[in-house]
Image (tube, helix red, strand yellow):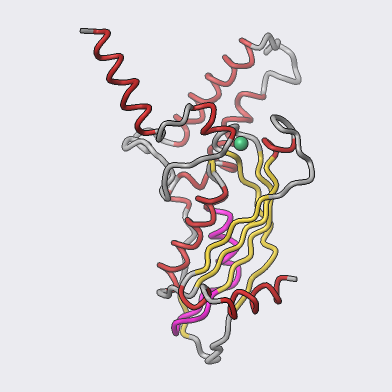
Amino acid sequence: MKHQEIMLNTLTKENNLNGFSEEEIGDDHIYTGLETPMKTDAFKISDEEKKDKIADLFSQIMDVMGLNLEDDSLKGTPNRVAKMYIDEIFSGLNPANKPKVALFDNKYQYNQMLVEKNITFYSNCEHHFVPIIGKAHIAYISSGKVIGLSKLNRIVQYYAKRPQVQERLTNQIAAELRQILETEDVAVIIDAKHLCVSSRGIKDDTSATVTSFYGGIFNTSSKIAELQNYLN
Ligand SMILES: [Zn+2]
């Protein structure tokens, strides 16, 4: 009976991973969907409780690795990591931290593409929990509404502050912009370096990953060329 249960679990798990092993999923950076995979009870406990738990668990990791937590330099590390995870680098997991966006009327009747380029962001690879460092370029054509330029930056930062894969980050930003701006005419390009590729594993320090989303009118060769022109 028990054996059967285990078999079933393994089967379901394999199906979910589309036949890939967990190891392959990590090193090839395959991802499973647009939404960040979250538990249904993700926000059942408060941020403060999460920090306490993470600090405790992280001190266990350090302890297992043989680090002396009595050392003056190390003893504050578990708390620092916990605070950093919840308040900073993974704060985008909590919808409460989503930037509030106000729309304005397009009073200037500006009807060409608007490009906000070179938005620097720091994210973390969800497969290795090491940094992804990159630049995002965003473009949209107003459907009659515009948003403050700094909001474009904030939307990028919000989705970057999650354990991520670059393709999902690109598509999450695009989905958010399409919804807020009420238009399909949105483009997102991300050019990033993954420290899990450069500092470990294959150890390629020169490669970068580029991903893009071209929606609506941006999905035409003339608009793509125009956008590329602004970015170069
Ligand atoms: Zn990685």
- Check the image and name the residue furthest to the right: 206
Magenta region includes residue 111: no
Ligand 1 - quadrant of the structure image? top right
Task: Name the residue: 49% across, 81% down.
Answer: 142
Which quadrant holds the N terminus?
top left
- Check the image and name the residue furthest to the front: 19
Task: Name the residue: 51% across, 47% down.
Answer: 92
Magenta span covers which residues? 140-158
Q: Is residue 131 left or right of residue 183?
A: right
Magenta region includes residue 142: yes
- What is the quadrant of residue 196 in the picture? top right
Q: Is residue 180 left or right of residue 60?
A: left
Task: Name the residue: 50% across, 86% down.
Answer: 106
Along the line of sight, the residue nearer the viewer: 153 or 140: 140
Which quadrant holds the C terminus?
bottom right
Q: Position of residue 216 (x, y in %)?
A: 46, 74
143 to 27, vertically: above or below? below
Q: Position of residue 12 (x, y in %)?
A: 31, 27
Task: Name the residue: 57% across, 86% down.
Answer: 112
Q: Position of residue 11 (x, y in %)?
A: 32, 23
Q: Position of residue 7 (x, y in %)?
A: 30, 16
Along the line of sight, the residue nearer the viewer: 102 or 5: 5
Total labels: the figure holds 0
